[in-house]
Image (cartoon, rainbow, N blue to C red):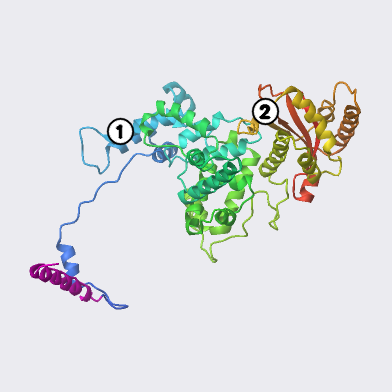
Amino acid sequence: RLSAAQEAARDAREAKRAAKKSAKKRKGPGEGEISWTRSTFERLVDAAPEQLTSRFEMTHAMVLNVLAGAPAAGRDPGEHLVWLARNNDDPPTDRNPHLRRLGEIYTSMKQAGVVEHVSSAQASASGEPRLRAATDLPDDFALNQPLSPFALAALELLDPESPTFALDVVSVIESVLEDPRPLLFAQEKAARAEAVAAMKAQGMEYDERMAALEEVTWPRPLADLLGDAFAVYLHANPWIEDQEISPKSVVREMIENALTFTGIVGRYDVGRSEGIVLRYLTDAYRALRQIVPDELMTDELRSIIAWLSALIRAVDSSLLDEWEAMSTGQALPASDGDGTEGTELAFGAREDGTVPFSANRHAFRTAIRSALFERVEAMSRDNVEALARLDEASRTPLVAPWGEDEWDAVLERYWAEHEWIGIDQRARALSLCSLNETPTREDVLELAPATASSDFERGQVARIEAIADAVDEAAAGTFWLATQTLFDPEEDMDWRIVALVDVPASDEAGRVALATITVGAR
């Protein structure tokens, strides 16, 4: 029980709070009125001006702009950069941080091949300054991000002959962009939900599932390659130690899954953050256009960049109009609409929005690999009924599907040589699944068994010869050969599934039209 003094103190506090709540707020100016007077103006005039703080800093973009513009203005780029570092509104200090930063930027750009420093003799012979931008860069090369030089250097690690080269370029560029965190968290949530379902199906205990989930994150293409490369790059460029690469798959996922802006926002339920997603796509478009040099620019990459530009304009064209006006020095065109142009289209879509199943080559290849691995999983369970159903479901007009007897025959031979078939991440490696998109008659005939001693083998020879004739007569690219190598206990990798993919039939059916040709040792 409170004493009288305590009760009085409590009442006083409550009365004080009540008074504060009931105190009327100062009424603001009404509509069309102003809140200042002449005395307010005179007080501002007579008062001492506030001290302005210099925000000058050396950046990669500034260095490149000077290298591009100084010669035309009759200045030496190197001397002008040093002059800028010394002549600015920063207070004088014993050590000039801008000169140090300029040196760091120069070293970083030189090691990345962005700039070159030639001898005086070379400069005199060419009529150009000693310090200059590399000639093989795009005119609007982007160095407004500290890791742009790393992205340029990392592109050299990719294999231009790889069927995923264009997507890998996209992944390198995405790794140096600012994270659209709401979308990445949604991707991680979806990946973890899928992982939990798979682990429950495998009978994993709760504690094991929770421990395994710690390793599940959003998709991070090329994470190992880029991580190792960045460690080497950081060793040579220690001044970027406060920067980190962030592998992610936003644009890449949209390409692989034929998604529009609305599609990816809806898939991950990030409608409240669609502005962040759109800004990210705009940054990705700019970086792709600015960083990728001409010698690495393939037709597929040009198609991706053009598609991304059209997609962004379909959502809000002002984002690109403003940037392109600034980059060209032209006036921003007047807008007479709602800032959108056209309809959102997925990568590879027709004008009417429909996407032929094979038009998006990345999504098509992924579907083929998935179809083949479904057979691997069924083989691992020795489930000939499921294998026959898979072949029937993906049948092609050209080739009759395998039945239970054919699958039973090949599995009997496999189990005589190996104890199990792997279906883990090692077995799912892209290196174990190859696609020949322009097979020849000879490629098909090589699949025939060397000897045909059984009815099954003799039937295989006749089947393969008929397929070879069809491939030879068809236009290039009509049929593909897909090969999935099986992961065996000894890691001999000697067994494989080879299937024929009928591209026109796939477009007509809206699914992979695939027929098993042969399963066996090489």
Task: Answer with left or right where residue 156 lies relative to residue 74.
Answer: right
Q: Along the line of sight, which residue is nearer the eye, 89 or 390?
A: 390
Q: Is residue 188 above or below residue 164?
A: below
**Residue 22 counted in the magenta span:** yes
Dot 1 amino acid type: Leu
**Which residue ends up furthest to the front in the rendered image?**
1
The span picked out in magenta is 1-27
**Residue 479 counted in the magenta span:** no
Task: Answer with left or right where residue 15 lies relative to residue 481.
Answer: left
> Sequence order check: which comes first, mark 2 or mark 1?
1
For the residues labelled 2 and 1, the Cα–Cα distance comes to 57 Å
Dot 2 amino acid type: Phe
- The secondary structure making up most of the magenta span is helix
Q: Along the line of sight, which residue is nearer the eye, 223 or 518?
A: 518
Q: Quadrant of residue 413?
A: top right
Q: Is residue 264 above or below residue 44?
A: above
User: Where is residue 9 drawn, in percent x and y?
Assistant: 11, 68
Q: Which residue is mark 2?
A: 487
Task: Answer with left or right where residue 364 lies relative to residue 328.
Answer: right
Measuring 15% from the left and 57% from the top, which residue is drawn there? 48
Q: Is residue 11 above or below residue 368?
A: below
Residue 99 is tagged as 1
- Binning the other alpha carbons within 10 Å of mark 2 as few (below 14), some (14 to 19) or many (20 upward) gives many
